[in-house]
Amino acid sequence: MIKKISIAYLTPEMYVSGFHWDQDVESSYQKEGRIPDWKTVELIKKRGVKELFIDTERGVDVEAGVSQDQIESEGDQTFAAYADEKPAVDKKVSTSEELIKAREVHSRAKGMIETAMQKALHGEDVDVDGFKELANDFIDSVTRNQNALACLSRIREKDAYLLEHSINVGVLMSILGKAMNLNRQSLFENVLGAILHDIGKILIPDEVLHKPGRLTEEEFGLMKKHSTFSRDILVKSGGLPQASLNVAYQHHERLDGTGYPQGLNKDTISLEAKMAAVVDVYDAITADRCYHKGLPPTIALKRMLEWTGSHLDKDILHTFIRAMGIYPVGSLVELTSGKLAVVIELNAQDQKQPMVKAIYHTKFKRFIKVELIDLTRKSTGEQIVRPSDPVNYGININDFLS
């Protein structure tokens, strides 16, 4: 739906479909598309735009009467409430030990998903049994130490979004399901569906799937069919539980009934699909895409809190934040000293004191010798001051993860 809004309500992840210009406005900025960050919002404001049009089917909506300043203030206050909660994470082995096993599982997953997509493209059945084993491997790894797979899920390669997204949603579903204390069978069925949830996208033409500009109404209608394609491919392959099919078919449904493909509402969307919506959105908005720059993890979680009620289930998102930590693995944070550090391991006792890897100094504006810092040790004199955006410093987080 196209909606005219005041510039005061413009936020990242909205999809701008047009501008309402005053006569004295500098009209050189006419770019339509998804708003990637707050810098772009400020740029549009500086151009003198007072009102504009957003496409709520292509990007996030905004509630009437909620301004950017209110969203920032309320979002920060709500998010801060999670900081004093004990994270839903435990460890049975060290992260370094689990990384050895996690890398093997992660690498195998890439090959399996690539093969499955090629089979689906040519109308062949997917090897469901192989993915059942993979789902169990994800769960076992997360149970031993979730930091390992969480760390690998932050490492992204250019032009491999669809493949990596499938893996990441499976990993994130494992973490969320464990935090929700699902029984092993339910967790397995959810993770299995999550790994295969987007397999139907292989049937969407590349020129639509990877189009950097605005999709036409016809193109967007085709894009929305991918969840139905996913379900049909999986039903044809056979051997998947209903919960797994629900994840694939319903993960784009919304609580307010504006989602697709069936327009279900909060009372008719399955629990597993509500869970899938949370992890799917988180991975999608933290990834660099052809039409937007990925959000830093902490900022992404704050944005997602704004979408509860209409899109995402608040209780499930609350559990997800506890499971991921307010500074998820892969986040860049600024420390008391001015150093920038990458979060590499969550602290099971205190979300505000993860294990970090210092890599850059904001005062000297240069990279520094990598330093591992345990923020639980008072002798370091370091605390997290704020999350930071690696783009602002030309930092590639991938270089400092595994």
Image: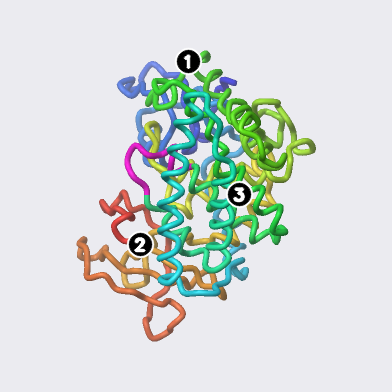
Q: Earlier in the sequence, mark 1 or mark 3?
A: 3
Q: Is residue 159 magenta?
A: yes
Q: Pointer 3: what residue?
A: 191
Helix, strand or loop status at disc 3: helix
Q: Position of residue 41 (x, y in %)?
A: 41, 36
Q: Are circles 3 and 2 on residues that touch, CB within 8 Å?
A: no
The x, y position of residue 126, in whole percent, is 55, 35
Does residue 203 show up?
yes
Q: Nearer the viewer, residue 329 or 378?
A: 329
Towards the viewer: 161 or 319: 161
Residue farthest toward the bottom in the current orientation of the protein = 379
Quarter of the image for the N terminus: give it.
top right
The x, y position of residue 214, in whole percent, is: 43, 21
Indicate left or right for 345 with 370 as reference: right
Mark 3 is on which residue type?
Val
**What separation in Å lies between label 1 and label 3 (alpha carbons)?**
33 Å
Type of amino acid under label 2 = Ser
Q: Which residue is mark 1?
A: 216
Q: Is residue 215 left or right of residue 391?
A: right
Q: Residue at x 54, y 51 (%)?
A: 134
Boundaries of the magenta span: 156-165
Mark 3 nearby-residue class (10 Å; few <14, some 14–19, many ≥20): many
Q: CA distance from mark 1 to mark 2?
A: 40 Å
The dot on residue 106 is none
Q: Earlier in the sequence, mark 1 or mark 2?
A: 1
In this rendered view, identify the residue nearer to me: 142 or 394: 142
Q: Quickly name the residue at label 2.
A: 402
- For the question of whether residue 73 can be seen, the reply is no
Q: Upstream in the sequence, badge 3 or badge 2?
A: 3
Amino acid type of disc 1?
A: Thr
Q: Which class describes the residues within 10 Å of circle 2: few (<14), some (14-19), or many (20+)?
A: some
